[in-house]
Image (spheres, coloured by chain):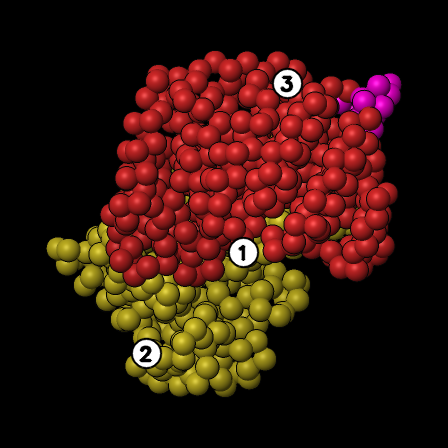
Chain colours: A yellow, B red
Amino acid sequence: MKYEITAQEGLAKSAHMETVHGSIETPVFMNVGTVGAIKGAVSTADLKEVGCQVELSNTYHLHVRTGDRLIREFGGLHRFMNWDRPILTDSGGFQVFSLTTLRKIREEGVSFRSHIDGHAIFMGPEESMKIQSNLGSTIAMAFDECPPALADRKYIEASVARTERWLVRCKAEVARLNALPDTLNQEQLLFGINQGGVLNDVRVKNAERISELDLPGYAVGGLAVGESHEQMYDVLDHVVPALPRNKPTYLMGVGTPLNILEAVARGVDFFDCVYPSRNGRHGHVYTKFGKKNLFNKQYELDARPIEEGCGCPACRDYSRAYIRHLLKSGEMLGMRLCTLHNLYFYNKMMENIRNAIREGRFAEFRRSMTDSYTGGEQ
Amino acid sequence: MKYEITAQEGLAKSAHMETVHGSIETPVFMNVGTVGAIKGAVSTADLKEVGCQVELSNTYHLHVRTGDRLIREFGGLHRFMNWDRPILTDSGGFQVFSLTTLRKIREEGVSFRSHIDGHAIFMGPEESMKIQSNLGSTIAMAFDECPPALADRKYIEASVARTERWLVRCKAEVARLNALPDTLNQEQLLFGINQGGVLNDVRVKNAERISELDLPGYAVGGLAVGESHEQMYDVLDHVVPALPRNKPTYLMGVGTPLNILEAVARGVDFFDCVYPSRNGRHGHVYTKFGKKNLFNKQYELDARPIEEGCGCPACRDYSRAYIRHLLKSGEMLGMRLCTLHNLYFYNKMMENIRNAIREGRFAEFRRSMTDSYTGGEQ
């Protein structure tokens, strides 16, 4: 793995990364395909068309449905979903702590019941790494606990300490699995995850300790779970400088276009979020002038594309009026077109951010994009 | 409009038709997009990729949702849905008689309530023609009653007589609308519809009478509504020879691949059916060896495409195992891929039928396709 910062302006960085599944230009937005498919009838052929560099799949979902063992027999997730570019898999931790019932956390790992059929599952660091190794993803995420947003300091400190111990086990297990002769991707990369709620001192100490493990990349987890944007930016102001700058810096599950812009300004260069696809399925579409709700009557006879000048498959061929008609009629095509537009919008925005950093005009770009985006609907 | 038979073998015919929206090679399968979109997240760009020549939209559905007046203001259905090839619109009659409540049929037309919001609507021949003129379709269908399959002779004879009187009014109204200076498509073609249940004598007399109106094309309606395949073929044996052979002959709402093959052998050259899209949404896919249910466990690790050698977007890129996984996970993409495959299968089958007729080997093609298709799953 090679990660090279190619341009910076203030704390913002743009990097070129090379992986066994191809290169990544950062800042990058990873497109979320929970079960190995982007919701909204988006195929991997579509992903290439909307400019996706990295696909993100959910370990927990693939483990409980179809199963990582079957996907491994099939030759791994890349072959299964027909995607030859990088894939990041999360660890399953977030879903274990948000979707399942009857959870019991011990030092060894977590016992819980599947949200689909209720069967008992145990997942700890080794299990999560084994599943991600079966999937053969490019980047595996460490198994962590994302403590409840309102947990007290005592709980968060204990949780972070355990997540640190789990990270050491994750690192050892990935090294062991990568060394096995029949492992699908022997160059799988492990990213560690920083936690600590909104307690900056806990976050920074944790960041310093996990940095010592010299992992290929680091994520900031447990944000965008209910705290304010200002709290999130404040955490980033403290924690990003405590993580290695010469490695990928990933802000998990974030966020709105302006969240991403602000995080880039603070040194983050990997992102993922369900907003573009989830909002697309509800007819909410992104433009440089903010979000539009295509269900609104004002678009009934609007012959313009969602965003004028946009090169996405929806804007190339269809009008706001037609897409509104599809959405009102409950036609899947309406959801698909809005999702394609939104993913294209996010991926294009990242390209614009990269170009701005590379051309030394990111500060200006940040101002003008913020002004335009908050200017309201046109 | 030009319609020229370019090849025939027995009763089977292949024709070249020219319309104001481009040419049609027959036999042709029209792809059904109820509200101006094929269900299963299929766009008009996709329709071109799966080889669709003619799109079929439903007058009733477009009238009650979004509305033909708005679509007219938008420049017509072609512009609204971004489709530059021929469109056939049905008359709304079938939906009026199958979807709505509190129907009252009089000589003037039908009063009923919308299946969406229950509001009162009146539709007769003039109203249906006006709506189809607003949509600007290439081919408009006559407003008819499709009598209940189990209706007695007396009801059917009265219904057919009224539908004949309605057809005279449809013809006059289309002529009037086409002559108006602001009509979107002044060359809109009207197809008459033959009815009569399974009473061959009623059907044949009706066919002879409507043939005298010298319309651009004729359809056989009211079949595939519960009668056996043998009854349907028997009706076709009687009625198709009573319709003008040198005009398009359209069997409405039919059907399975073998139904189409048998109807072609009896002189039919236009078809439409929801089977490929509806079955696709349920994971049932067509192959030359019959239909497969992709939910079956046998496909769990099957790395082959739905049909080997198929050039559709699903078979080019994805395996049975992956599509099965998508279907089991409830991902829209699974439905979309199966629908794309099925539409491609139907359109390709029609191309194979045309080539067989043109090369004088349709009888052989009919035998070998029937043997292969009824041979069961491979």
What residue is disc 2 on?
Answer: A122
Q: CA distance from mark 1 to mark 3?
A: 48 Å
Q: Residue at x 74, y 45 (%)?
A: B158
- Closer mark to the observer between disc 1 and disc 2: 2
**Which of the numbered marks, if any, corresponds to residue B19?**
3
- Asked if the residues shown at circle 3 and circle 2 are in contact, with their CB atoms under 8 angstroms apart, the answer is no
Q: Secondary structure at mark 2?
A: strand
Q: Secondary structure at mark 1?
A: loop
- Closer mark to the observer between disc 3 and disc 2: 3
**Horizontal and vertical percent position of residue A17:** 37, 42
Residue A364 within the segment the image draws in magenta: no
Residues B226 and A176: in front is: B226
Above-or-below relation of B245 to A61: above
- Magenta highlight range: B173-185
Above-or-below relation of A178 to A337: below
Q: Quadrant of residue A301?
A: top right
- Closer mark to the observer between disc 1 and disc 3: 3
Amino acid on which the number 3 mark rests in the picture? Thr
Q: Chain of mark 1?
A: A
